[in-house]
Amino acid sequence: MNTKEFIKKVKNKEIDIVEHTEEVIEKARNINKRYHLFNIISDDSAIEQAKTLKKEIKKNNIKNKSLLGVPISVKDCVCVNGVESRAGSKILNGYKPVFDATVIKKIKEQGGIIIGKTAQDEFGFGTFSVNVGVDFKIPLNPLDKERSCGGSSGGAAGISQIADFPHIAIGESTGGSIVAPASFCGVFGLCPTYGRVSRYGLIDYANSMDKIGTLGKTIEDNALLLKSISGHDDNDSTSINSESDEYSSYLKKGIKNIKIGIINESFGEGVEKEVTEKVMGGINKLEENGAKTEKVSLPLTSKYGVQAYYLIAVSETSTNLAKLCGMRYGRHEELTGNFNEYFTKVRSKNFGEEAKRRIILGTFTRMAGYRDAYYMKAMKVRTKIIEEYKKAFKKFDLLVSPTMPFIAPKFSEIEKLSPLQNYMADIMTVGPNLAGLPHLNVPVGLSKKMPVGMLLIGNHLEEGKLMQVGNIFNQ
Ligand code: GLN
């Protein structure tokens, strides 16, 4: 049963929404025992929500409830009223927001049911969801437990893959955290244009790049949820003042004469052979369906994207995390010593290793004397990268590359990677994130029984086109 059929049955009262939600919670619990995809399953509040919804359905009060009863999982970094929201970090243990993030408010208004908070790299710091916070469990890929779900929205992608009930996930991306795990778990993942979706109530990683987006088994599910959460928000000054499209209308359009640029630099050294083959197969399929393809070169993005991204990301995040010191914000410890001693104690105990690495790096790149050499330089490179993309979009509707250079790695392989090798894994995804461009992961086949993902990148505000093209791969 797809989501549309499910909603129809709920509307027609063929499905009791309270019973259904209870079943889903039970299933989520069982899945979680095996794969650790949730940090929290919000059973009480989900059932409470279902009961309220049931009353509304009885009264036929369901106008504008486009998500009627659909279970929605939420990445841990998005605040849900009354539900512990920690962005995967021990330093936020016990934090229960007293408000809903704008996206959550919208989902609830439209009848979606929040079933829990999904596992992630601490504050989004990673590509494999192995950099979880102190005392958190690493999510396991449901297609092979020895492999990573991808990150940082690992739990979101994992549950999207394994759920045998109607479900759509809320993820978040700063540098690729929606499409990377979607690629490793074989689902569709859509990161919208920067500003398309309000960030109010998102626990920040790097504000100038953070985007809330969606993951799900089908393009329709992504279209449905994105439509529900996008739009201007007075609470987020960076949210765009433009009407959100009727995304589902793009799904019927076909792709005749759509112009697609194949990013030259993304098929070379470091990309697994079978990944290249499957993505090429995907491109052939687009051509068979009438798209016009041509090679395009993005030399600057390929050469400097990762460096610029990591400099900007760590600079922004080190300032964001400064407030978490156990005084006003963040977990309290026994108050001993002077301020420096207390601050050091709280942060040493409660931040994981990667968070500490990024705080140190980011503090360095912003320091007087280094700021111009690193942070400012990276910002200039970012502008150049945006210009490079804008030039490409004068000619093309969309750009295409592999999403990740390899299939989901085994945990034993990840252990051997240096931090630099870790960061290089993001080479395909950091570009569109630096430029605030919408992008979509499309599953295009298997290699060693694991999914291969193709990345489609669109011009600003052209999520519709991504769905139009991605829909060719919807099964
Ligand atoms: N892997 C990238 C990083 O570690 C992107 C993570 C993200 O998008 N949150 O920064």
Image (spheres, rainbow, N blue to C red):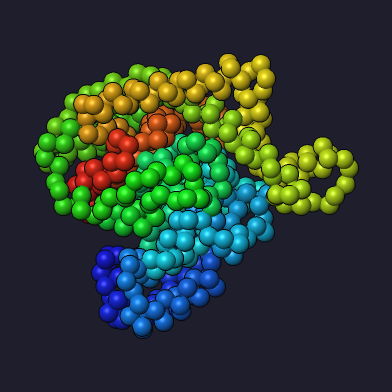
Residue at 67% from the left image edge and 55% from the top image edge? 93
Residue 361 image point, x, y percent: 63, 28
Residue at 76% from the left image edge and 45% from the top image edge? 346
Residue at 38% from the left image edge and 52% from the top image edge? 230
Q: Is residue 409 visible?
A: no
Q: Is residue 68 left or right of residue 210?
A: left
Residue 349, above or below 142: above
Task: Pick the quarter of the image with the N terminus.
Answer: bottom left
Residue at 69% from the left image edge and 45% from the top image edge? 324
Q: Splitting the image into 4 quarters, where does residue 191 fall?
A: top left
Nearer to us in this view, 352 or 381: 381
Residue 463 image point, x, y percent: 29, 44
Nearer to us in this view, 252 or 186: 252
Q: Is residue 223 left or right of residue 209?
A: left
User: Seen from this angle, which residue lies furthest bottom?
Assistant: 58
Q: Is residue 91 visible?
A: yes
Q: Splitting the image into 4 quarters, where does residue 366 fall?
A: top right
Q: Is residue 169 left or right of residue 256?
A: right
Task: Pick the quarter of the image with the C terminus.
Answer: bottom left
How many marks overall? 0
Residue 72, above or below 258: below
